[in-house]
Image (cartoon, rainbow, N blue to C red):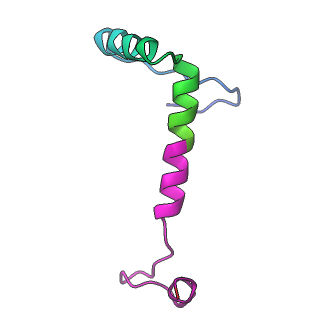
């Protein structure tokens, strides 16, 4: 998939999944955009925090080891 320069995100999903997702969002008084933005921000934050600098052999670099001390 290409990544354009606009702020739009376009995906194609199974119509049943779409219907179920909208039903759950409606019950939780959310809309798709708000849910997506919140979920995307959380996903990015969690992946940034989980990423530590490692060397090729699976050991933490000296800088990363010192930061945790």
Q: Is 39 colored magenta in this rendering?
A: no
Q: Quadrant of residue 17?
A: top left
User: In the image, is residue 40 above or below residue 53?
Assistant: above
| Left or right: 43 as drawn, with respect to 7 | left
x%, y% of residue 31?
54, 16
Q: Residue furthest front?
A: 28
Q: Position of residue 46 (x, y in %)?
A: 49, 53
- The magenta region covers 42-68
- Foreground of the two, 56 or 22: 22
Residue positioned 48% across, 65% down in the render: 51
Is 33 left or right of 26, judged from the image as shown? right
Residue lying at 45% horizontally and 82% vertically, measured from the top left: 55
Number of numbered labels in the structure image: 0
Question: At 52% from the left edge and 28% from the top edge, which residue is drawn?
Answer: 36
Magenta stretch containing residue 52, yes or no?
A: yes
Up/down of 54 relative to 36, above or below: below
Horizontal and vertical percent position of residue 63 = 57, 87
Looking at the image, which is closer to me, 44 or 38? Answer: 38
User: Picture coordinates of residue 10 (x, y %)?
Assistant: 53, 21
Furthest-left residue in this view? 16
């Amino acid at each position: 998939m290409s990544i354009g320069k606009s702020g739009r995100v376009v995906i194609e999903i199974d119509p049943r999944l779409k219907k179920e997702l909208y039903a759950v969002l409606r019950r939780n008084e959310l809309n798709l955009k708000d849910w997506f933005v919140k979920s995307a921000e959380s996903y990015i934050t969690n992946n940034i925090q989980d990423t530590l600098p490692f060397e090729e052999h699976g050991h933490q670099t000296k800088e990363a080891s010192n930061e945790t001390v």
